[in-house]
Image: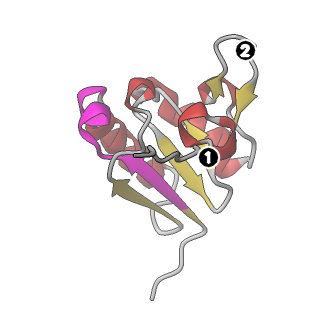
Amino acid sequence: MKMFRSHLLLCGGTGCHASGSLNVKKALVAELLKRGLAEEIKIVETGCNGFCAMGPIMVVYPEGVIYMQIKNDDIPELVEEHLVKGRILQRLLYREPTTEESHSHHAGYPVFRPSRTTGLEE
C-alpha cells in the first residue's frame, strides 16, 4: 500500500460542486504536479461535509485543518503555505460571524459541534 504524507479531502457534495470544487480539484492536481508533490500528497474527493454554504471545503490530514470557500486562485498559496512550509493559511479558515474568531478544526464549527438529542414523551 502506498503511503502519502498528506491527504487532501476535498468535498464532492452537490453544494461544493456547485461552488466550483471540481475546478479546485483540477487546480490542486496541476499545482502538485508542477511542484513535484503528486507522489507525496493524495487528493480524495469525499461526500458532503455538511457545511455547504462555506464550500468548497477541504480537510488536510494528518493535521485535520479545514479550509473553506477555496477558489482556484487560492491553490498556489495554499500549497506553498500549508503543504510546503507547514503553516496554516489563516484567511481560508472559518470565522465565527459574531466574534470573528477563526477555527482550524471540526470542533470550532457550529455545524460540527455535538448536538443534544431529546425524545418526545407520549
Determine whether the residue tagged by mark 2 lies in a helix, strand or loop.
Answer: loop
The amino acid type found where label 1 is placed reads Pro
Q: Is residue 76 left or right of residue 50?
A: right
The amino acid type found where label 2 is placed reads Glu
State which tag comes first along the sequence, 1 or 2. Answer: 2
Q: Which mark is residue 36?
A: none
Residue 85 coordinates in the image, percent (x, y): 73, 47
Marks 1/2: CA distance? 21 Å
Residue plotted at (40% across, 46% down): 122
Residue 93 image-quadrant placement: top right
Q: Is residue 79 visible?
A: no
Q: Quadrant of the N terminus?
A: bottom left
Residue plotted at (71% across, 39% down): 88
Q: Which residue occupies the foreground of this view, 47 or 115?
A: 115
Residue plotted at (56% across, 42% down): 112
Q: Which residue occupies the foreground of this view, 34 or 22?
A: 22
Q: Which residue is mark 2?
A: 100
Q: Is residue 10 left or right of residue 15?
A: right
Residue 116 image-quadrant placement: top right
Instruction: Report if residue 24 lies within the magenta region.
Output: no
CA neighbours of label 2 inside 10 A, class few (<14), some (14 to 19), many (20+): few
Disc nearest the viewer among 1 and 2: 1
Residue 42 image-quadrant placement: bottom left
Residue 74 coordinates in the image, percent (x, y): 50, 28
Q: Which residue is mark 1?
A: 114
The reply to whether discs 1 and 2 touch (Cβ–Cβ < 8 Å) is: no
Report the span colored magenta: 7-19
Residue 13 coordinates in the image, percent (x, y): 28, 43
Residue 70 against residue 28 in the figure, above or below: above
Residue plotted at (58% across, 37% down): 78
Residue 82 coordinates in the image, percent (x, y): 66, 44
